[in-house]
Image (cartoon, helix red, strand yellow):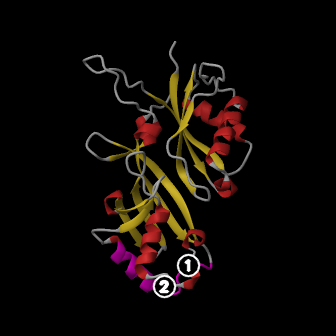
C-alpha cells in the first residue's frame, strides 16, 4: 500500500514566533509521535519522518497560514487527526487549523509522472499584514500614508539584493502583486511572490520604502524591522490560469 500524503495547515503565534525552522521541525516530529499519527519513515541508515514545510517563516514573524506536508501509512478523518495533533502540541502559540489529503499527481497520457504537488514545490505567493507596535507609529501619520500610497503606485522599485556570492540590483515591483495601507485600521497589506523561482520578503519591501523617503523620515521607526509586527495571512500555489490558490484548497477533507 502506498503512503498517503497529508497537508497540515497551522498558525504560529505568541512566543512561538521566536522558534526557528529546525526547532519547529523537531517540535512537529515529537507532536506527531505523541498524537500517534501513522507517519511514514524514509529508508536507509538513518530513517526520518517524511515531512516538508511549504515556505519556512522568518524568526519573529507570526502566521495564520503555515503548511506542513507529511506522508502516512494510514489516516483517520481530517477532524480526528486535527484534534489529536492539537492535543499533542502541549504549548500555546501553535494550532493546527486543518488536515487534508493531497491527491496523488498521477501520470499524463504518455505515462510521464505529473508535477510534484508538494507544498514546497508549489508555493508561489503569500499575503502579509504589517502593523506598527505600540509606541512606534509614525508621528506624521497622514504624511506617512501619502508617501506609502505613492510608493505602491511606482512602476519600478529598485533594491540591492544580496545573493550567496555577491549582491545585485533588482526591480522587485513585478514580485509585488499588491500593497496598500488602510488609513483607518493602520494595517499595511502585501501580496508578494514566494517560492524557489521568485521570493520577496515584506522586510525588503519596507526597506525599499524607507530608503526612498529618507532614513531621517521619522526616528521612531528608523529600526522598522523591530517596530513592526509582520503576520503571514495565507500561502498560495499558482493555478492553471495564473490565479493564486490557497494551499489548503488543493487538499481533500477526509470524512
* Element under disc 1: helix
For the stretch drawn in magenta, the main secondary structure is helix
In the image, residue 219 lies at what x, y percent?
56, 84
Q: Which residue in the structure is indicated by mark 2?
A: 217
Marks 2 and 1, Cα distance to the nearest angstrom? 8 Å
Disc 1 crowd rating (10 Å Cα; few below 14, some 14-19, many 20+) is many
Up-down relation of residue 109 to residue 77 (above or below):
above
Determine if residue 252 is in view. yes
- Which residue occupies 59% across, 78% down? 136
Classify residue 27 by image quadrant: top right
Tell me whether circle 2 and circle 1 mark residues in contact (CB < 8 Å). yes
Magenta residue span? 135-151
- Of the numbered discs in the image, which one, if any, rests on residue 221? 1
Q: Secondary structure at mark 2?
A: loop
- Picture disc at residue 134: none
Depicted 41 relative to depicted 154: above or below: above
Q: x, y percentage for residue 63? A: 55, 53
Magenta region includes residue 218: no
Residue positioned 33% across, 20% down in the render: 107
Q: Is residue 175 left or right of residue 23?
A: left
Q: In this picture, is 2 found above or below 14?
A: above
In depth, the one of 13 and 60 nearer the eye is: 60
Amino acid at each position: 500500500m502506498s503512503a498517503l500524503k497529508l497537508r497540515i495547515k497551522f498558525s504560529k503565534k505568541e512566543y512561538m514566533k521566536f522558534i526557528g525552522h529546525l526547532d519547529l521541525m523537531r517540535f512537529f516530529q515529537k507532536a506527531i509521535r505523541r498524537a500517534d499519527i501513522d507517519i511514514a519513515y524514509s529508508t536507509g541508515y538513518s530513517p526520518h519522518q517524511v515531512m516538508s514545510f511549504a515556505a519556512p517563516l522568518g524568526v519573529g514573524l507570526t502566521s495564520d497560514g503555515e503548511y506542513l506536508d507529511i506522508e502516512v501509512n494510514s489516516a483517520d478523518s481530517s477532524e480526528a487527526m486535527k484534534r489529536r495533533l492539537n492535543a499533542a502540541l502541549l504549548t500555546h502559540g501553535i494550532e493546527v487549523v486543518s488536515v487534508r489529503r493531497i491527491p496523488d499527481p498521477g501520470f499524463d497520457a504518455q505515462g510521464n509522472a505529473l508535477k510534484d504537488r508538494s507544498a514546497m514545490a508549489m508555493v508561489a505567493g503569500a499575503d502579509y499584514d504589517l502593523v506598527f507596535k505600540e509606541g512606534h507609529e509614525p508621528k506624521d501619520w497622514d504624511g506617512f500614508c501619502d508617501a506609502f500610497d505613492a510608493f505602491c503606485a511606482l512602476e519600478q522599485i529598485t533594491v540591492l539584493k544580496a545573493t550567496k556570492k555577491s549582491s545585485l540590483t533588482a526591480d522587485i515591483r513585478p514580485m509585488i502583486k499588491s500593497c496598500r495601507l488602510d488609513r483607518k485600521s493602520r494595517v499595511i497589506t502585501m501580496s508578494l511572490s514566494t517560492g524557489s523561482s521568485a521570493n520577496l520578503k515584506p522586510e525588503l519591501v519596507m526597506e525599499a520604502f524607507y530608503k526612498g523617503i529618507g532614513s531621517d523620515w521619522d526616528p521612531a521607526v528608523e529600526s522598522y524591522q523591530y517596530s513592526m509586527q509582520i503576520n503571514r495571512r495565507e500561502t498560495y500555489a499558482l493555478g492553471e490560469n495564473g490565479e493564486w490558490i490557497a494551499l489548503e484548497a488543493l487538499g481533500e477533507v477526509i470524512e
